[in-house]
Image (cartoon, coloured by chain):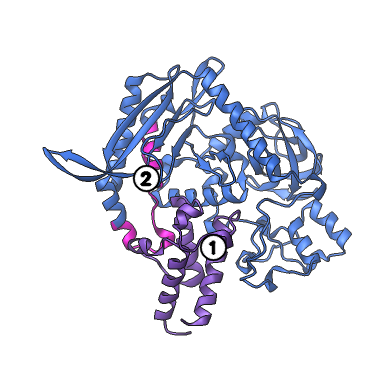
Chain colours: A purple, B blue
Amino acid sequence: MNESHQARVQAGIRDAFRRIAPEIDLDAIDPTANLRDEADLDSVDALNLIVLLDEKLGVEIPESDYGQIATLRDMARYLEARLSDEPES
Amino acid sequence: MSKPYRMPSLGAGMEDGTVIEWHVEPGQRVRRGDVVGVVDTEKGAIEIEIWEDAEVLEIVADPGTKVPVGEPLLVLAGQGDDDDRSPSAQESVEAATPGSAEAESPALEDVWDESEAAPEAAPVEAAPRLRVSPVARRRARELRVELESLEGSGPGGAITLADVESAARGEAGEEEAPDSAGQEPPSSPPRPKDEEPGDKDRHAAMRKAIAVAMTRSKREIPHYYLAHAFSLERTLRWLSRVNEERRPAERLLLASLYLKAVAKSVREFPEFNGFWDDGGFRPAPGVHPGMAISLRGGGLVAPAIHDADQRSLEELTKGIRDLVQRARSGHLRGSEVADPTITLTSLGDRGVETVFGVIYPPQVAIVGVGSVVERPWAVGGMVGSHRVVTLTLAADHRASDGHRGSLFLDRIARHFETPEDL
């Protein structure tokens, strides 16, 4: 996997979390556990997260793909794959 | 003519608040709806707004001062003098006017959040003139920071205490790397260090405020409870179709449909929208539902979405997103926490099926929505699988009766079932 994509995705997820859940320590979250349960995100937090990821990374996640980003690890993989689909700018 | 700007009452039971910081200084002109400062209350740090165009003559209460509700904070020079109104009445009357501050509530992207250290938090446009809070000015003198060299992150580009302190540490916003997320941003506005109440104190204060309000509710309010389950299948299909074609920022939240359905219904059932005080029911002039938002650190706030009955689903979704994010970061405004006219509660989409609410006095009703669950559901003699939701109403029996309550709940459900008309 492209390293710069990986770094961008990690930074994007961190920034987004700092906005929607400033009180959560992302490093303390099990990357394989259900993120909404682990971080206690409600549906409003979840939409805010998707919006911020779109703004920061330019990846629009359709509602039908929400099931593919249920854990932190899956979310990172999904975003990295979508970034790789784009032509390098 | 000069007059005092007083500590507003931000909800029943509030006795005092502590000034955290001012965003204004003597000689500064303020406009109706401007946030002039931040006060610490048992509901957390609340941004307080001004309700008329005026000029600030004097700051009476310095940061760190605890001020009782109704006591002067600032001296203003404005047109006319209507100071005989109590601050709480003034707040709710003004906030109830359509077009009040909330109507111009900034989009999520523009929300001022000084806990934000990332570059995108830098103001888009430079302030026309230097705006500095007094506490920031004082600190800048102490730390020998040149104010002219700073870009403010406060409202209208105002330079805040945090800007000065970060400049003194040599970490101007621009230079900060976007992935410096390792360090935790402060979750509440800065305050003089010796005044810092710990998180524990804050939680204890909020717990106490909830205890007072809920005890009063259960002691004084004769609640009655109704529940109504119905299929959300049609609504959810409509919502998926709408959201499928939209960018994330334009997507609708199910909560916006719920909010609008309640707000529209309340217009036909005004006995659920208002306050029980002085032994009688006082209907509210506007529809300002409070959204119960649970805070992850513990506790609960229920700030209002103003004039929800007159707003589109898009506006309501943006309003809810903005409100939740600000509730999490401690940037709610005085008008939002002071004047909800009915409360909505949802225990989320991963929780239980039915919620029986406790009314927040002096309101007279709370509408609850449970999580959406898949259930066998009979329609026209055929059983199919439907996504079903249970709406509940807890209402004050002094202000309304069960018959009207059941019609009200049914009306909300009907609006909910026909989202295209909301």
Q: Is residue A5 above or below residue B76?
A: below
Query: What's drawn in magenta, residue-wise?
Result: B241-267
Residue at 64% from the left image edge and 60% from the top image edge: B116
Q: Is residue B145 above or below residue B364?
A: below
Can residue B422 be seen in the rendering of this structure?
Answer: no
* Residue B169 in the image, given as x and y percentages of width and height: 79, 66
- What chain does badge 2 belong to? B
Residue at 76% from the left image edge and 64% from the top image edge: B166
Which label sits on residue A16? 1
Can residue B214 be seen in the rendering of this structure?
Answer: yes
Q: Secondary structure at mark 1?
A: helix
Mark in the foreground, 2 or 1: 1
Nearer to us in this view, B410 or B93: B410
- Disc 2 marks which amino acid? Leu
- Please report contact status of discs 2 and 1: CB closer than 8 Å, yes or no: no
Which label sits on residue B257? 2
* Residue B68 in the image, given as x and y percentages of width and height: 74, 31
- Disc 1 marks which amino acid? Ala
- Assign the C terminus of chain B to one quadrant of the image: top left
* Residue B352 in the image, given as x and y percentages of width and height: 39, 40
- What chain does badge 1 belong to? A
Q: What is the chief secondary structure element of the magenta stretch?
A: helix
Q: Indicate the quadrant where residue B57 lies.
A: top right
User: Gap between marks 2 and 1, in whole Å?
Assistant: 26 Å
